Image (spheres, rainbow, N blue to C red):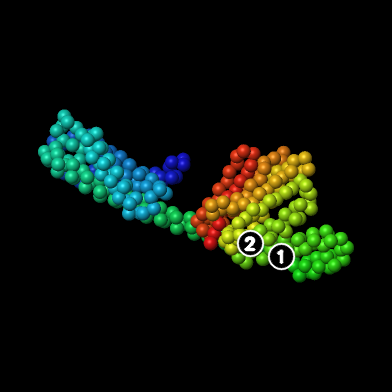
Amino acid sequence: MKFVKRYQLKAGIFISLFVSLLVFIPRVIRYDETEDFIVLLQIAFSSFLFALSSWIYSQFFLKYAGIKQQWLKAAIAISFSMIVSVCLAQFFQYQDSGSNLLYSTTLSEQRRILMLLFRGVVVGGFAYLCAYYLNMLLETQQATIGMEHLKQENLQARLNSLKQQISPHFLFNSLNTLKSAANEEHVKEYVVQLSLVYRYLLNYNDNNLATVREELAFINAYSFILKERFEDGFSMRINIDDNIRELHVPPLSLQILIENAVKHNIASLSKPLNITISNNEGYIVVSNNLQRKFSSEESTGKGLINISDRYRLLAQKTIDIKEEDGNFTVKLPLLP
């Protein structure tokens, strides 16, 4: 199924049938009793195989990321078509009837090869143009669907935000009152960090990107609250170079990764959960030690999907997810 989807064989088969009919119908119109009708069918079958093979490697080169220039991809695909055109003609040649599936053997060998190469250029070029046009249509359709999906998610996020923002000013005033009433400095600090977390959560929907500096400030406040909850069962170490702090990431992406780590792993005094945030070659790397909870609740992966979708739609980039050596690591590309 993946092969069919990747190379869009339904469209390729339809186009190949069309090409084979273009070859077959004129031969049928000129048909006389001296010709073998089975040979005509074999001509059509040979043309079908040739057009289908041209379609498949046209699709392959279109999707091949190692070559960036479209003209070079087209040139290589057409060159393959020229080679296959000659090879198929030789394979299906009928010596007994004294004729070739495509051209009469009364032609000189040089002229016959030139005509076969020309067929490769025509059919290969036609297949590549059709494949390119279809891929452009599919990419445009996927981008449109992706944008609509992002709009729906954004509307849902704003709706959820409105539900949670019944009275933000009342909440901040209450937090300030609680801070003033608290006698212990530790409690006052907790209230301050909680207010910073809540303020960031209220404002993140206004922007598609946040600087690394802003995200780290938020993460410091968020980790303070987690530290109060888990005490020595949770630790987080941040090692980020100063020269990348003005670069960008999608807002709350680091928080989602930390929340996932806490949700799916044990964080206790006997088994501390350790999270590290660092940067490496254009990425922010978030890693935690794996010690999964035994839970009947199956992970949906929505957090990682959300981050991945935002990177794809905002910058056509992908995140890197790895699980090895007892650690779970996610690499987020840094954006300008």
The type of residue carrying mark 1 is Arg
Crowding at dot 1, Cα within 10 Å, few <14 / some 14-19 / many 20+, comes out as some
Determine whether, in the image, residue 53 is placed left or right of residue 291: left
Q: Nearer the viewer, residue 66 or 144?
A: 66
Q: Position of residue 91 (x, y in %)?
A: 24, 34
The type of residue carrying mark 2 is Arg
In the displayed orientation, state which residue is furthest to the top.
96
For marks 1 and 2 on the same chain, the one whose residue lies earlier in the sequence:
1
Residue 43 location, quadrant: top left
Determine whether, in the image, residue 102 is placed left or right of residue 271: left
Crowding at dot 2, Cα within 10 Å, few <14 / some 14-19 / many 20+, comes out as some
Q: Nearer the viewer, residue 157 or 293?
A: 293
Q: Position of residue 267 (x, y in %)?
A: 74, 44
| Residue under label 2 | 213
| Residue under label 1 | 199
Residue at 76% in and 46% down? 233
Residue at 64% in and 42% down? 327
Asked which secondary structure carries label 2, the reply is helix
Asked which secondary structure carries label 1, the reply is helix
Q: Position of residue 98 (x, y in %)?
A: 14, 33
Can residue 247 be seen here? The reply is: yes
Q: Position of residue 82 (x, y in %)?
A: 25, 44
Residues at marks 1 and 2, CA–CA distance in whole angstroms: 16 Å
